Image (cartoon, rainbow, N blue to C red):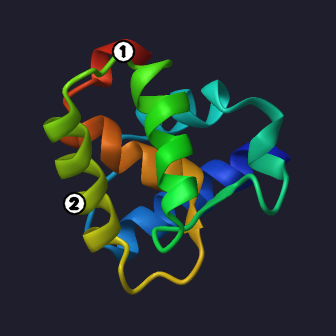
Amino acid sequence: MSKFDDVVAKAAEQLAKVGVKADDALVRAIAKSQGPSIYLRDASLVSCGDDAELKRVEDNFLVKKLGVTDKAAIKKALDSACAKFKDVRQKMRVAFYYVLVKELKKESFFS
């Protein structure tokens, strides 16, 4: 199994733990869009307790990459994702972004 496949499998496993049935193709597309950062320990994780981190997710992923501009929708999606992962200590960025994409109905961006 390649390192990429390992990351995708771990993200799908983490999604299953929080009750999300993952679409493998979408998980792969999101992982691929993150580039080599998925292999770096700190860059591959998201912290809901860090406001600066959530602001980076908002600015760099939701606004710049997905083109979401509705601040209320962004806040709702981030709150929902953080609530879903509340019992997960190390939130994988790929899994977290998957939940955001589904919440904002932006799957078509990755097809």
Q: Quadrant of residue 82?
A: bottom left
Q: Is residue 88 left or right of residue 92?
A: left
Q: Is residue 98 left or right of residue 11?
A: left
Which residue appears at 27% of the width and 24% of the height?
Answer: 106
Image coordinates of residue 109 in percent, x first then y, are: 37, 14
Which of the numbered marks, if any, corresponds to residue 80? 2
Amino acid type, label 1: Gly
Residue nearest the observer in this picture, 99 or 80: 80
- Would you place residue 67 above or below residue 84 in this image? above
- Residue hosting label 1: 67
Residue nearest the observer in this picture, 53 or 5: 53
Pointer 1 local density, CA inside 10 Å: few below 14, some 14–19, many at least 20? few
Q: Is residue 65 left or right of residue 109?
A: right
Image coordinates of residue 110 in percent, x first then y, are: 43, 18
Q: Is residue 41 left or right of residue 6?
A: right
Asked if one can make out residue 1 in the rendered structure from this viewpoint, the answer is no
Q: Earlier in the sequence, mark 2 or mark 1?
A: 1
**SS at mark 1?**
loop
Amino acid type, label 2: Ser
Assign the C terminus to one quadrant of the image: top left
Image coordinates of residue 51 in percent, x first then y, are: 49, 61
Which of the numbered marks, if any, corresponds to residue 19? none
Question: What's the CA distance linking mark 2 and mark 1?
Answer: 19 Å
Image coordinates of residue 48 in percent, x first then y, are: 46, 68
**SS at mark 2?**
helix
- Would you place residue 35 above or below residue 58 in this image? above
